[in-house]
Image (cartoon, helix red, strand yellow):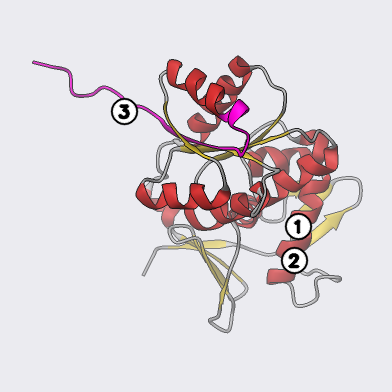
Amino acid sequence: MADTSETPPVNLLVVDDEATLREPLAAYLTRQGFVVREAASAAAARSAMLEQVPDLVLLDVMMPGEDGLSLCRHLVESKSVPTILLTAKGEPTDRIVGLEIGADDYVVKPFEPRELVARIRSVLRRSQRPPAPVEDDALYLFEGWSLDPLKRRLTAPDGATVPISTAEYRLLTAFLDRPRQVIDRDRLLDLVQGREAHLFDRAVDNQISRLRRKIEEDSRNPHFIQTVRGGGYRFAADVRRSAQP
């Protein structure tokens, strides 16, 4: 009997307006066993994803029209598609922007194709972790707030739904899983990004600022997410879990 348990091929979408880079890269990745589609713009990528959502997107940052950062933001907030940014920019501030948006990795051109393949496989391993046990689907509850991990829905005490990005969701759950514990920036980056990003710890500070604006009554005088001098941050509230209704 034929073996029907073979792992299906990984579908990649390469988005880059430079055909001289996009086409050879797509050919190389195809030889590595991936199923590769190409898009020369963010608009073309959006159309391609209406037909089929890829397993991972390789996304150029500098493109005419809608740039890669804008498309990346759309992907992580609406589709939860793993994304690796490709860019000629190598300044730390540019990398920080990618981390803040929620990209899974960031590769500076020119890059070694074998390294890119290794990064692709690393991101895919993280994104394909087994689903959480049923008990981990329970609601997080803290001082009238609730977070539904199944729907990634944050609800305020007045019942209003508060939109949060994928990066903000990861950051909030990192705190809710460790209430009243001091967590330093390196650890937060490991928890939120799932990779070595400790050189860019400003990304954590900026994400926390945005999350504070979502859940704090006064983000300049935070009640929940408190800064611990020289230590990192602490979620200063009791958190309990409750089964889904």
In the foreground, 41 or 136: 41
Q: Which residues are magenta?
A: 1-22
Which label belongs to residue 208?
1
> Which x, y percent locates residue 150?
43, 58
Marks 3 and 1, how far apart in space?
38 Å
> Which x, y percent locates residue 146?
54, 69
Is residue 214 magenta-colored? no
Tell me what residue is drawn at x 60 percent, y 39 percent: 59
Q: Given contact means CB atoms under 8 Å apart, are the residues at marks 3 and 1 in contact?
A: no
> Which x, y percent locates residue 36?
43, 30
* Element carrying mark 2: helix
Q: What amino acid is labelled 1 in the image?
A: Ile
Earlier-in-chain disc, 2 versus 3: 3
What residue is pinned by disc 2? 212
In the displayed orientation, state which residue is furthest to the bottom. Answer: 158
> In the rendered image, which quarter is residue 165 located in?
bottom right
* Res 244 visible: yes
